[in-house]
Image: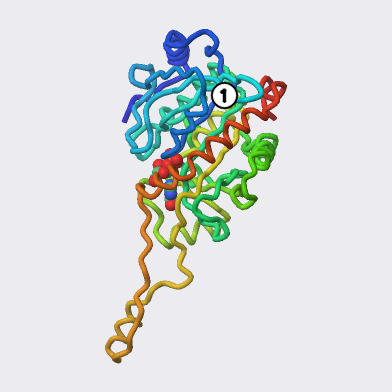
């Protein structure tokens, strides 16, 4: 496990990053996190400077296919040139990274000056009304590791300024969620492409068993993934406005009825012909493939949302 970076490391990391950047990019106002297979979001940026994680104090290396290991700085937007920083590759606890390492890039982006962050991820759809390829504007989360004793904020508080007891009831900015739907409308996306839902954070790296999928659906989750929530908490702790967009890359298997091998054997012994069900199995390759197919829509949506964020909002701490 990589050593846990702390508040004390931040000035060193910020200085190393700024040294690599032209002055106009020293203070980005919006952060972006690119989910699995979604690093193509960087193609919306102009005048890009890449800063590799390698060599940045406190940063680890992303080991997951579909995640690169660089920060990309540049400008985005048609109406205005908004300075942004995008994480091309995130860290997940299942890679063996500590939760402090997972949250560290968000804390660095906040120290660089971001006011809002758009966090994207690839996730499994639990809500039967969602399609593969649906983009979900996250309105709430279920932090399963958090509820069972692994809350990312356990431990010494990150800095003297942050609160010990972070409220998360309003973590997902209604103002930014509103902009997501306005942006989709302006881009002419079909209304079913963008939906709203609750994201369940699980540790992974296994995908869900059918019983786990059934459980998560029953307790109110629409999507499930292995990332995002620690990043949301790190951002909210520092007053950064949060928008999360989850791309449904697959449907989680939730059986209406379990296949009965007992009945199948009985039917076979009775000489009856039976139709065997097709087994559905999710894979990371499929997750990356949907990211590739929907990458362009995600990219346009993120760029349009950033274009719509009024300067007054970008410059004020989100409620
Ligand atoms: O959440 P992101 O990083 O987009 O990736 C998702 O896709 C991977 C599994 O296919 C897991 O890492 C899961 O969390
Ligand atoms: N936990 C989890 N993470 C995912 N990331 C992409 N798809 C899935 C999924 O089905 N389950």
Quadrant for residue 237, please give it: top right
**Quadrant containing the N terminus in the rendered view:** top left
Q: Which residue is mark 1?
A: 76
Residue positioned 53% across, 17% down in the render: 111
Q: Is mark 1 within 8 Å of ligand 1?
A: no
Quadrant for residue 130, please give it: bottom right
Residue positioned 34% across, 17% down in the render: 55
Q: Is residue 127 above or below residue 173?
A: below
Question: Is disc 1 surrounded by few (<14), some (14 to 19) or many (20+) residues within 10 Å?
Answer: many
| Image coloring type | rainbow
Q: Is residue 187 above or below residue 268?
A: above
- Residue in the foreground of this view, choosing between 190 and 130: 190
Q: Is residue 61 visible?
A: yes
Tally of numbered discs: 1
Q: Is residue 170 visible?
A: no
**Quadrant containing the C terminus in the rendered view:** top right
Disc 1 element: strand
Q: Is residue 20 above or below residue 241?
A: above
Q: Position of residue 6 (x, y in %)?
A: 44, 20
Q: Position of residue 208 (x, y in %)?
A: 41, 55
Rendered-image quarter of ligand 1: top left
Is 312 positioned to the left or the right of 68 in the image? right
Q: Position of residue 231 (x, y in %)?
A: 50, 33
Residue positioned 51% across, 48% down in the render: 200
Residue lying at the far bottom of the rendered structure: 270
Is 293 positioned to the left or the right of 192 in the image? left
- Residue in the foreground of this view, choosing between 186 and 164: 186
Residue lying at the far left of the rendered structure: 269
Q: Position of residue 202 (x, y in %)?
A: 45, 46
Residue lying at the far right of the rendered structure: 312
């Amino acid at each position: 496990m990589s050593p846990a970076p702390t508040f004390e490391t931040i000035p060193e990391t910020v200085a190393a990053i700024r040294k690599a950047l032209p002055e106009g990019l020293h203070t980005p106002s919006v952060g972006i996190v690119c989910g699995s297979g979604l690093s193509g979001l960087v193609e919306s940026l102009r005048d890009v400077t890449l800063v590799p994680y390698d060599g940045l104090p406190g940063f680890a290396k992303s080991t997951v296919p579909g995640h690169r290991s660089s920060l990309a700085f540049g400008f985005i937007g048609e109406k205005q040139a908004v300075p942004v920083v995008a994480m091309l590759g995130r860290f997940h606890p299942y890679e063996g990274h500590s939760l402090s390492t997972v949250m560290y890039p968000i804390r660095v982006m906040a120290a660089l000056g971001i006011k809002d962050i758009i966090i994207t991820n690839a996730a499994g759809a639990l809500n039967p009304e969602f399609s593969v390829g649906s983009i979900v504007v996250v309105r709430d989360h279920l932090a399963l590791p958090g509820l069972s004793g692994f809350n990312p904020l356990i431990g010494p508080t990150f800095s003297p300024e942050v609160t010990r007891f972070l409220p998360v009831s309003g973590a997902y900015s209604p103002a930014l969620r509103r902009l997501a739907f306005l942006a989709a409308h302006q881009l002419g996306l079909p209304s079913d492409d963008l939906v709203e839902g609750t994201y369940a954070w699980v540790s992974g790296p296994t995908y869900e068993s059918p019983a786990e999928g059934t459980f998560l659906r029953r307790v109110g989750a629409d999507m499930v993934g292995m990332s995002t929530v620690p990043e949301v908490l790190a951002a909210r702790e520092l007053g950064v406005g949060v928008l999360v967009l989850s791309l449904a890359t697959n449907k989680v298997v939730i059986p209406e009825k379990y296949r009965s091998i007992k009945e199948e054997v009985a039917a076979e012994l009775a000489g009856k012909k039976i139709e065997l069900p097709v087994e559905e199995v999710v894979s990371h390759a499929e997750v990356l493939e949907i990211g590739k197919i929907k990458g362009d829509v995600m990219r346009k949506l993120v760029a349009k949302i950033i274009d719509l964020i009024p300067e007054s909002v970008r410059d004020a701490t989100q409620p």
